[in-house]
Image: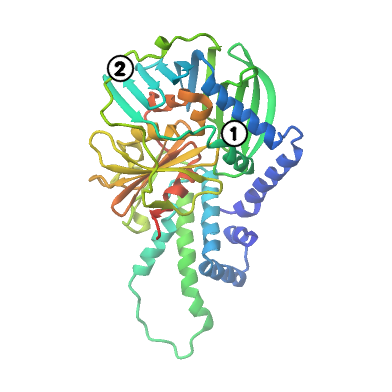
């Protein structure tokens, strides 16, 4: 307990100030934001297929990814190569997950809203308030030349990011998330990838029998849920609010999303299940998950942030106007 | 802000400390900073196992403690009037401090049974009540729903959805 306030906290603040001063390679806001925009644009507009490794904790799993785009939209397919075979199909209306080991198919409707670039420009100016952006060196990733970009958080409510973008197209070849001790929380890393190659639509078709969509289903629309978060960490703005239907005959769930432009935190509010619930913190990769009861409701908050962020948000959820 | 740090380190003269504690009691914003500082420190030490509302709950329990009725002194001592609330505050802080010290970076999560009360019922591990975080059946579905709004998806497309099919089951924290 001792010496924290006097020593560690000022040190933290001081080190941030020094870092700010010493950065000759700190990017101008405009240039940094342009780099991020280019990464997002490449993810949408390039045809590519490759194999990437997802590392989290002491685990590593490889998957194959195919991205195809034409006038009718984007089509993506992800197939896991290690462990149980699983497949994700994503298009403009839904995300379908196929669990080959159990034969289960899960559908998730997408939201009627453009995440990028509609979200980004106004969020981007906020981004530089909470992250220090700077260019790092060039590197070779999966046989391609890449430019590295570092986003260092200015407080304890977010993780640091290091991104490697392919130089010609801007496609993200490697992405790493780091905690305040510099430990890697999660990493995505292409081991081989072909960019701008002709990809046929067949290669993004599901390798399983796709159930017909339920009639009358469309994308989800934003609604007022009657819930609010009073005390989220600075920089996290509400970007979405909606009601969703829990699968397997579950009830209505309120879903609020907060983002600082680089990380997002989702809040789910549902009726309390019958089992006894106590607050609990867990994580999956870099995603922190915190669950707590609130009178007759169960609050679940998750996001790719440190635990303190999801906990602070979960602890300030309340019905609107109270 | 500086004063909170000094207070956290316990380096105030008693009289100054009392004044600071009174300020904390009267200024919700300051009290919030006090809590946040502790949260930061706990996060740095990987000791985020207690609910951030823990001290609130302890205080709520203290409120419920029966009041001991005793004959009044004829001449009330000014110090005695302040001693009790301060002692209570310090006791609350001491309990938190003691808990933090007595659980040196263990891997088993600490569970605070909401509403159950006293420090004796703060448990190591999941003896009586199981934290829902790891088992909550809705979490895989929520991970997928969340992914759509994550900027990582905007930058990586469906690649970031690998989190939702990863072989790993959500883990309880450290």
Residue A322: where, in percent of width, then height? 40, 60
Residue B97: where, in percent of width, then height? 49, 55
Label 1 or label 2, whichever lies nearer to me, is: 2
Residue A111 numbered mark, or none? none
Is residue A291 positioned above or below A210 on the image?
below
Point out the tag, 1 or 2, that comes first from the N-terminus: 2
Residue at the outermost front position: A71
Residue at numbered disc 2: A100
Between residues B148 and B124, which one lies in front from this camera angle? B148
Is residue A243 positioned above or below A196 on the image?
below
Residue at numbered disc 1: A182
Residue A280: where, in percent of width, then height? 37, 44
Q: Chain of mark 1?
A: A
Is residue A137 positioned above or below B134 on the image?
above
Q: CA distance from mark 1 to mark 2?
A: 37 Å
| Residue A5 placement: quadrant | bottom right
> Which residue is located at x 30 percent, y 17 percent?
A100
Q: In the picture provided, is A94 more to the left or to the right than A26?
A: left
Instruction: Tell me if residue B14 can be seen.
Output: yes
Q: How many marks?
A: 2
Between residues B149 and B100, which one lies in front from this camera angle? B149
Between residues A238 and A185, which one lies in front from this camera angle? A238
Residue A295: where, in percent of width, then height? 31, 55
């Amino acid at each position: 307990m001792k010496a924290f306030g006097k020593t560690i906290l000022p040190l933290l603040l001081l080190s941030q100030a020094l870092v700010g001063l010493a950065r000759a390679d700190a990017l101008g806001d405009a240039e940094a934001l342009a780099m991020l925009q280019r990464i997002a644009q490449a993810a949408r507009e390039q045809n590519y297929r490759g194999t990437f490794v997802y590392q989290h904790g002491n685990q590593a799993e490889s998957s194959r990814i195919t991205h195809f785009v034409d006038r009718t939209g984007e089509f993506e397919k992800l197939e896991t190569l290690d462990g149980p075979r699983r497949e994700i199909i994503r298009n403009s209306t839904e995300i379908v997950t196929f669990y080959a080991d159990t034969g289960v198919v899960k559908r998730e409707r997408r939201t009627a809203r453009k995440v990028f670039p509609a979200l980004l420009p106004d969020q981007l100016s906020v981004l530089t308030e909470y992250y220090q952006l700077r260019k790092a060196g060039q590197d070779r990733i999966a046989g391609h030349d890449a430019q590295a970009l570092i986003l260092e958080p200015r407080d304890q409510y977010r993780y640091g990011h290091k991104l490697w973008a392919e130089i010609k197209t801007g496609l993200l070849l490697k992405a790493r998330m780091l905690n305040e001790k510099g430990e890697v929380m999660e990493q995505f890393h292409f081991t081989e990838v072909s960019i701008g190659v002709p990809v046929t639509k067949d290669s993004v078709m599901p390798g399983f029998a796709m159930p017909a969509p339920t009639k009358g289903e469309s994308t989800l629309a934003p609604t007022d849920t009657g819930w609010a978060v009073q005390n989220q960490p600075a920089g996290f703005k509400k970007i979405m609010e909606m009601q969703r239907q829990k699968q397997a005959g579950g009830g209505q769930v309120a879903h609020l999303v907060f983002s600082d432009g680089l990380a997002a935190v989702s809040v789910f509010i549902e009726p309390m299940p019958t089992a006894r619930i106590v607050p609990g913190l867990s994580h999956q990769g870099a995603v922190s998950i915190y669950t707590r009861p609130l009178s007759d409701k169960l609050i679940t908050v998750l996001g790719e942030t440190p635990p303190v962020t999801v906990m602070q948000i979960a602890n300030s959820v309340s019905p609107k106007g109270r | 802000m500086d004063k909170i740090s000094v207070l956290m380190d316990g380096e105030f003269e008693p009289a100054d400390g009392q004044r600071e504690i009174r300020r904390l009691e009267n200024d919700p914003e300051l009290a919030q900073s006090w809590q946040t500082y502790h949260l930061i420190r706990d996060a740095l030490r990987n000791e985020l196992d207690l609910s951030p509302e823990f001290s609130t709950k302890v205080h709520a329990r203290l409120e419920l403690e029966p009041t001991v009725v005793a004959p009044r002194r004829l001449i009330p001592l000014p110090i005695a009037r302040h001693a009790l609330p301060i002692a209570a505050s310090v006791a609350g802080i001491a309990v938190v401090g003691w808990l933090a010290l007595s659980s040196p970076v263990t891997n088993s999560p600490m569970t605070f049974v909401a509403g159950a009360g006293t420090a004796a019922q703060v448990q190591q591990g999941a003896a009586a009540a199981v934290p829902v975080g790891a088992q909550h059946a809705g979490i895989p579905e929520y991970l997928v729903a969340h992914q759509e709004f994550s900027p990582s998806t905007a930058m990586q497309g469906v690649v970031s959805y690998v989190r939702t099919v990863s072989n790993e089951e959500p883990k309880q924290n450290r």
